[in-house]
Image (cartoon, helix red, strand yellow):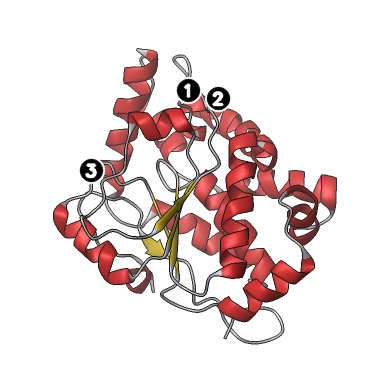
């Protein structure tokens, strides 16, 4: 159930557990160790205390250096997790911002998001940090968190990669991805995204276009996975070829995360 996955926080959107799914061949992904979210710039003290209770050992930040500088994450005084990121500049562009330029309509927004996702498997800053994320999951047997800006696009792709590597069925993988559309304070998240878009571009963008940019859609993730299949056949081969994820690391990650 959605309520069992979502951690109800005040200032951090879309914070949820992406474990618990059945895997091919039997077993399921562990609960309470794989977390995903949006960034933590507006986290309240109560939010930070809730995060501390999770026992996070690793936080993986998929944003670029410029995004981190623009929206620094709040941390509690007792925060002790390792924060992993590869560095690099993304021109401040989360995928939904990259797709938002101009006074666009909903169909243009949809098409741009599809194009953005199609290139996502090769975004340099994302690839470099995904390498760190997969290495951490294969090495450390402790709770981790992965996030970007809105916790839906780059995080959605990262989670999809991990799910497939663990053997989660693609129907469940897509189900988890689409929870962004119902998890947490959706209207607040959309309004926040609209403000960022209008602040950056100074454009009049239609409300339905904003909703398209700030939501997730099966065709978005399908576009990224289609790129992976076109070039590598499957996610495992992509991870090995592009993300430096060896068979030994794969075996170690499954041993730690599947019960």
Q: Residues within 10 Å of mark 1 (few under 14, many from 20)?
A: some
> Which structural element holds mark 1?
loop
Examine the rendering and report whether any part of residue 22 can be seen: no
Q: How many marks?
A: 3
10 Å neighbourhood of mark 2: few (<14), some, or many (≥20)?
A: some
160 horizontally vs 3: left or right:
right
- Residue contact between numbered discs 2 and 1, judged by CB atoms under 8 Å: yes
Q: Secondary structure at mark 3?
A: loop
Query: Compared with residue 164, is residue 204 higher up or lower down, i.e. above or below?
Result: above
**Snapshot quadrant of residue 258:** bottom right
Q: Is residue 142 left or right of residue 257?
A: left
Q: Position of residue 195 (x, y in %)?
A: 29, 27
The quarter holding residue 79 reads: bottom left
Q: Earlier in the sequence, mark 3 or mark 1?
A: 3
Please report whichever mark, 2 or 3, sits nearer to the chain's N-terminal start: 3
Residue at (43% x, 48% y) in the render: 151
Of badges 2 and 3, nearer the viewer stands 3
Residue sitting nearer the eye, 145 or 180: 145
Tag 2 secondary structure: helix
| Viewer-nearest residue: 135 or 112 | 135
Q: Which mark is residue 105?
A: 1
Residue contact at pointers 2 and 3, CB within 8 angstroms? no
Instruction: Work out whether residue 69 or residue 13 is closer to the camera in this orientation and state it.
Output: 69
Q: Nearer the viewer, mark 3 or mark 1?
A: 3
Q: Nearer the viewer, residue 56 or 183?
A: 56
Give the residue at mark 2.
108
Marks 2/1: CA distance? Answer: 5 Å
Image quarter where the N terminus lies is: bottom left
Residue 181, percent from left and from top: 41, 52
- Distance from label 2 to label 3 (Cα)? 30 Å
Look at mark 3 in the image and give the residue it sits on: 42
């Amino acid at each position: 159930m959605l309520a069992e996955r979502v951690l109800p926080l005040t200032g951090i959107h879309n914070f949820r557990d992406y474990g618990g799914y059945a895997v091919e061949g039997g077993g399921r992904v562990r609960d309470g160790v794989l977390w995903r979210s949006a960034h933590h710039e507006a986290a309240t003290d109560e939010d930070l205390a809730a995060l501390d209770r999770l026992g996070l050992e690793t936080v993986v930040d998929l944003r670029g250096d410029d995004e981190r500088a623009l929206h620094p994450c709040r941390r509690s005084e007792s925060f002790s997790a390792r924060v992993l990121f590869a560095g690099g500049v993304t021109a401040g562009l989360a995928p939904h911002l990259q797709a938002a330029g101009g006074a666009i309509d909903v169909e243009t927004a949809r098409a741009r998001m599809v194009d953005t996702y199609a290139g996502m498997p090769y975004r340099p800053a994302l690839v470099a940090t995904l390498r760190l994320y997969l290495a951490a999951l294969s090495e450390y047997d402790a709770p981790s968190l992965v996030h970007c800006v809105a916790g839906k696009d780059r995080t959605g792709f990262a989670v999809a990669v991990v799910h497939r590597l663990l053997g989660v069925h693609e129907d469940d993988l897509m189900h988890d991805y689409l929870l962004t559309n119902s998890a947490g304070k959706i209207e607040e998240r959309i309004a926040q995204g609209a403000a960022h878009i209008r602040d950056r571009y100074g454009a009049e963008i239609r409300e339905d276009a904003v909703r398209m940019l700030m939501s997730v859609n099966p065709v978005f993730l399908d576009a990224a996975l289609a790129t992976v299949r076109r070039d590598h056949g499957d996610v495992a081969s992509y991870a090995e070829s592009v993300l430096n994820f060896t068979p030994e690391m794969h075996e170690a990650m499954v041993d730690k995360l599947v019960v």
